[in-house]
Amino acid sequence: MSIVVTGASGHLGRLVVESLLARGTDPARIVATARRPEVLDDLAARGVEVRRADYDDRASLEKALAGAERVLLVSGTAFGRRVAQHTAVIEAAVAAGASLVAYTSAPRASTTSLLLAAEHAATEEVLLAADVDHVLLRNAWYVENYTDQLPTYAEHGLVGATGEGRVSLALRREYAEAAAAVLVGDGHAGRTYELGGPAVTLGELAAQIGGASGREIGHTDLDVAALQQVLEGAGVPGPAAEVFADVDRGIAEGELLVPTHDLARLLGREPLAVADAVREALRA
Ligand SMILES: NC(=O)c1ccc[n+]([C@@H]2O[C@H](COP(=O)([O-])OP(=O)(O)OC[C@H]3O[C@@H](n4cnc5c(N)ncnc54)[C@H](OP(=O)(O)O)[C@@H]3O)[C@@H](O)[C@H]2O)c1
């Protein structure tokens, strides 16, 4: 039985493969796919089978998923093209006779108003209609979305538009460990997991990042239109700026707030406290 992890060249996919290995999964059972397989040479050297898969190239998907039993479809990054891309992966998984496809989605994707979630919702529909068991891993926000911005925050502070809204945060490696647990575990078929760690306001998060980094990190709360202008002024193209600013609207309205019990269940422990997660992310 092979376990296929797509997007293994990315942060999350690689961490899922690492987590599978750390759990003692036979490397020969793991297939890690990437558009440029050479970036996974280190995994190949550890016995993981590396195959080329491009979500835009159906022939590559057929070859990459051949023999797949369980598949983790890591959502892609090409906004606007992702439903077609993800559909191609799901169809290849079905054609390969896979028994389970897990998909990294967004919080409450089927009902949320978040612009960012539209492609996730559409992908979920395709997966639910497909002739294969599914697991929806609806990941809330990565801590690293914020800690990676430390140089910008040190200069300009954390600028957002979330008011007193709270966002559920966990480390990428925690979402990855949860995905690995699903890939090797039983009883997950048909389940939807709303995954996230403890929640904070961006004001609290700025203070946590400041404390952990020893830098002075201010926090400015704008309205959503003003945030979009700031993002565009910083060089983010208009449509992307709209989507990113809309994330803050969503946080303000509780759209990225999820209980921690699903993540705790899959991890077998409580997710890290935000302060600990911030420290770990800043050390990386
Ligand atoms: N929950 C959150 O906070 C959050 C934040 C950011 C993103 N996300 C979503 O979660 C996904 C995983 O996160 P991440 O941190 O691992 O992102 P990441 O590091 O940007 O990795 C994205 C992965 O998708 C792969 N990919 C993109 N287009 C592809 C294509 N046409 N064919 C095959 N592979 C393709 C990339 O391959 P290459 O290496 O070849 O580019 C990479 O492996 C992201 O792709 C995005 O959909 C979630």
Image (tube, rainbow, N blue to C red):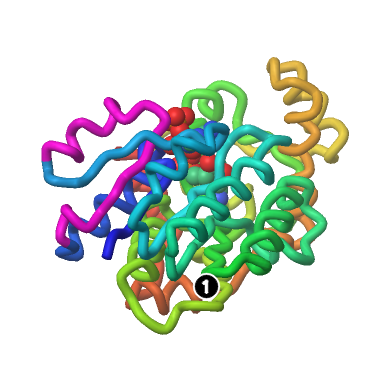
Query: In the rendered image, which residue does mark 1 sit on?
Result: 133
User: From the image, which quarter does the N terminus lie in?
Assistant: bottom left
The one nearer the camera, 95 or 88, is: 95
Which residue is located at x 44 percent, y 70 percent?
Answer: 99
The one nearer the camera, 158 or 233, is: 233
User: From the image, which quarter does the C terminus lie in?
Assistant: top left
Q: Secondary structure at mark 1?
A: strand
Residues packed near mark 1 inside 10 Å, few (<14), some (14 to 19) or many (20 plus): some
Mark 1 Cβ inside 8 Å of ligand 1: no
Relative side of 257 to 135, left or right: right
The one nearer the camera, 81 or 117, is: 81
Residue 109 among those drawn in magenta: no
Which residue is located at x 80 percent, y 34 percent?
Answer: 242
The one nearer the camera, 43 or 177, is: 43
Q: Position of residue 166 (x, y in %)?
A: 66, 59
Q: Is residue 276 visible?
A: no
Q: Position of residue 101 (x, y in %)?
A: 49, 63
Residue extent of the magenta highlight: 26-45
